[in-house]
Amino acid sequence: MPISSNLIAEFKNLLGPENVLTEETDRLSYAYDAAVLKQVTPGLVVMPDNEERLGRTVKLAYDNSLPITVRGSGTNLSGAVIPDSSDTVVILTNKLNKILEINLEDLYAVVEPGVLTAKFANAVAAKGLFYPPDPGSQAVSTLAGNVALNAGGLRGLKYGVTKDYLMGVEFFDHNGELVKTGSRTVKCVTGYNLGGMMVSSEGTLGIFSKLIFKLVPPPKASQAMMAVYDTVEGASETVAAIIAAHILPCTLEFLDQKCIRVVEANSKIGLPTEAAAILLIEVDGSHQAGVDEDAAKVKELCAKCGSKNIQVARDAEEKNKIWEARRNALPSLARAKPTTVLEDATVPRSKIPAMVSELNRIASKYKLEMGTFGHAGDGNLHPTILTDRRNEEEFKRVEDAVDEIFDVALSLQGTLSGEHGIGIAKAKWMVKETNKATIEFSKRLRTALDPKYLFNAGKKII
């Protein structure tokens, strides 16, 4: 049902005509995200430019029973920001993009929801501090989106993910009322942990207006290296061996041969294209001696598990090349075929060898072109299927393969999603990982906070 002209006029009066997109050609840009799912064009797209207008926008939409989807940069990979229906109002947070405070004495920062992750990290670094979460989409993803999906990144193994840095949250409920939780203090047990509830909520419980993040001192020393393997098994066994040895690298990343070759073809950075797999590893710490000791142990374990060559970065330029290889994995794979299906099957770290073996078996079984990369150190792999959705027969095999990937991950005591979220893509699988009682409890919670079920309807818990 189209949104009435009178209601559109109210939004324009509230936000200004320039902040309300009504033309279909404009609205089409917000019909999809980075997931390979059906597009749904929203009925209206609005851009509040301050906190007060954001709250009033939420109230106006909710009072008129319009479905609401909040969107940052749309980098989501599970359909979490695809509108539920053609009468959905998409609320963009891009104009709420101010870093309000970086506190050097108490090590925290206060930001609006639309601040870009990399912009924030760089601003913090310029002050001599460190914000560790670094999702692959950090150049364009927003901080509120990171909280809504609990984004991780390459440094998650040692430093944790977004939830580990969230100290406080302000958000609007369905009445457009401002809810505050958390604090600028290291400890805070005032009231319920509503901030924890909002992490991974995917826009289904409220609309972020302000975020408080913990900052930490940066590491003073680091060493990066690339370990090259003739077998995938050797690389995956190394991951388990490093963790079992109680060594915690800053990053421990995996690329298989398909990824290596595609990245090298696009980037020309000198990757070993004949290798079956490579591990990209960085250790860091407060003292060079400790870093050197950990790096020596890591190199020893790599060699013991079959690495035929270990290249240590001699300077910042070589270190940057190592991480350029990893960050270029997805963009390079995405250029290889018209459709890229990226998953984030996550298993206990000791199960990485078994998961990698199963992924290779699944790719062979369904005769699919698959490259696998990811945060092997925390068990979070990204099997990436290269295909063409227009080929219906092949895409049916893709869907069957994805189902089997989820089955395998769960059988290894893993999870459906390490960092990409549930959205539309994985909602049907939720009961399989949890149980019916968990889903019903979640529905009651959601209905209590959103009686009309308008906040990002059709996502996560359905």
Image (spheres, rainbow, N blue to C red):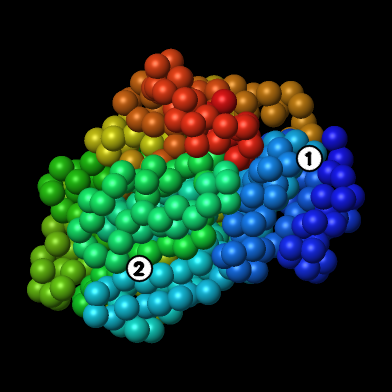
Q: Quadrant of the N terminus?
A: top right
The residue under label 2 is 131
Amino acid type at circle 1 is: Asp
The residue under label 1 is 87
The residues bearing labels 2 and 1 have C-alpha atoms spaced at a distance of 38 Å
Q: Quadrant of residue 252?
A: bottom left
**Please, which residue is most extreme toward the top here?**
436
Question: Of tags 2 and 1, which is closer to the observer?
Answer: 1
Kind of element beneath mark 2: loop
Between residue 36 and residue 272, name the one nearer to us. 36
Left or right, 99 with reference to 83 = left
Between residue 95 and residue 251, name the one nearer to us. 95
For the point 58% across and 51% down, which residue is it?
176
Q: Which class describes the residues within 10 Å of circle 2: few (<14), some (14-19), or many (20+)?
A: many
Amino acid type at circle 2 is: Tyr
Between residue 288 and residue 344, name the one nearer to us. 344
**Residue 198 in the image, given as x and y percentages of width and height:** 43, 46
Left or right, 433 with reference to 310 = right
Q: Quadrant of the C terminus?
A: top right
Kind of element beneath mark 1: loop
Between residue 305 and residue 247, name the one nearer to us. 247
For the point 49% across and 55% down, which residue is it?
178
